[in-house]
Amino acid sequence: MVEAVSVQHDQKQAVAAELYRALAAGDRKRLDEILDPAFEGRTTDGLPLGLGGTYAGADTMRRKFWGQIARSYDARAEPAEYRHLDDGQLLVTGRYVGEARQGGGKLDAEFFHLLSFDEDRITGLVQLTDSARWTDALGARRDLSTVDFRVADGLAEIRLDRPHVRNAFDQAMADDLYEIAQRLAADPEVRAVLITGNGPALTVGGDIAVFADNAGAGLPGTLRRMISPYHEALRILSGLDAPIVCAAHGAVAGGGLGLLYCADIVLAAEGTKFASGFAALGLSGDGGNSWFLPRLLGPRRAAEFYLEQRVLDAHEAVEWGLVTRVLPAGELAEGALSTARRLAVGPTRAHGEIRRLLRESWSATLAEQLTAEADAIARTARTSDASTAVAAFIDKHKPTFQGR
């Protein structure tokens, strides 16, 4: 009997060790063999980039947790000790070591992993680690050159700043937006975000001069290098607790439309034009257009917008579902700022749950969405803002939210 238990322990430890080797090597095939399809991962609350939480399914854990770590950190988990528990679980202790990919901040954080097994496959992982060390690694900031960024009184302002080219995207702007998105995800004091731009337009999308300079064999690589950090920025912005307001003026085109998509409220100045423009360049598109447009406009209008290269004015953009409302050009800046400020004094944790519920409903069944709502309202019910608001309602006065 003792020998059988010893064999089981050896098998579990070997599988766990193989897990860390597969993660270090990025071996997806081996991970599929190690992880049970019903695998569930629970990671440390407070991790930056929205990494803390529960991941149902091996594929979800691989893509949304380990995949995001690989995109943002050059890091590995180094196990130091394996301890077998009486309930059949395996406790692994060790350290995460490496650095953030942007800025190069060093990561050195202890971890505790509690692994559950079904025979020779891992069915669950509960992670405990020092989330502050992960955040600090991202805190080694690179200088911004194409975007003005500031945070004051809970409101973050992102202002594109290449006005001489109507805020066309180049590599520096893509990198700056990714840097800013990481800062926002790591800053719990941010309670709302405002996206706008200097000069005559919010953004006309990719910088055609950059495309021309790299035409031919060099263009695919140039586009991939630009799109990767920009897409990651959009993904992070879409997952923030803080609601996002976008102020559009002049023109919004191409991949720059992605800034509208990650926003919750989009205000447009009279006279603003919206277009994809990709087909005119012989390109297929980026910025999340192919995912958001069918959901916002419907599949027929999305195809028309893409294929017929429709240019929408601000009022058409409202009618089609691309924009929330139109303001006179002279009122856009103040209208967007006042909207963002109102959101910045709201219940930030509830705003975050609402953002996720609305976004994730697009791919959820009714049963899944009802479960998600029940889980989310239970989480928000535990916040101090909820307690404050209920007491204020009983006392018939307006609550003051703290965002926690």
Image (cartoon, helix red, strand yellow):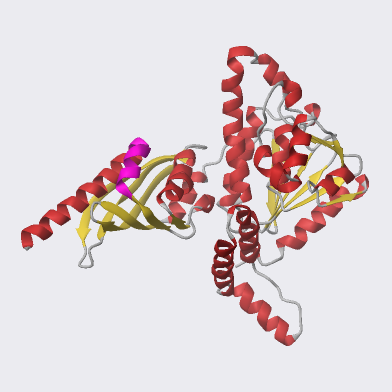
Outermost residue to the bottom: 395
Query: Horizontally, is 164 left or right of 184 in the view?
Result: right
Decide if residue 29 is in sight here.
yes
Outermost residue to the front: 300
Q: Nearer the viewer, residue 369 or 328?
A: 369
The answer to whether 147 is drawn above or below residue 388 in the figure is above
Residue drawn at x 74%, y 29% is: 168
Decide if residue 253 is in sight here.
no
Q: Quadrant of residue 288?
A: top right
Residue 34 included in the magenta stretch of the image: yes
Query: Horizontally, is 266 left or right of 115 in the view?
Result: right
The answer to whether 184 is drawn above or below residue 390 in the figure is above
In the rendered image, residue 392, in percent from the top left (x then y), is placed at 71, 81
Residue drawn at x 61%, y 29% is: 226
Query: Horizontally, is 35 left or right of 151 in the view?
Result: left
Q: Quadrant of residue 342?
A: bottom right
Query: Bounds of the magenta span?
Result: 25-35
In the rendered image, residue 148, in percent from the top left (x then y), is placed at 71, 40
The answer to whether 305 is drawn above or below residue 149 in the figure is above
Q: Quadrant of the C terminus?
A: bottom right
In the rendered image, residue 106, in percent from the top left (x then y), is placed at 42, 42
Residue drawn at x 73%, y 39% is: 257
Residue 397 included in the magenta stretch of the image: no
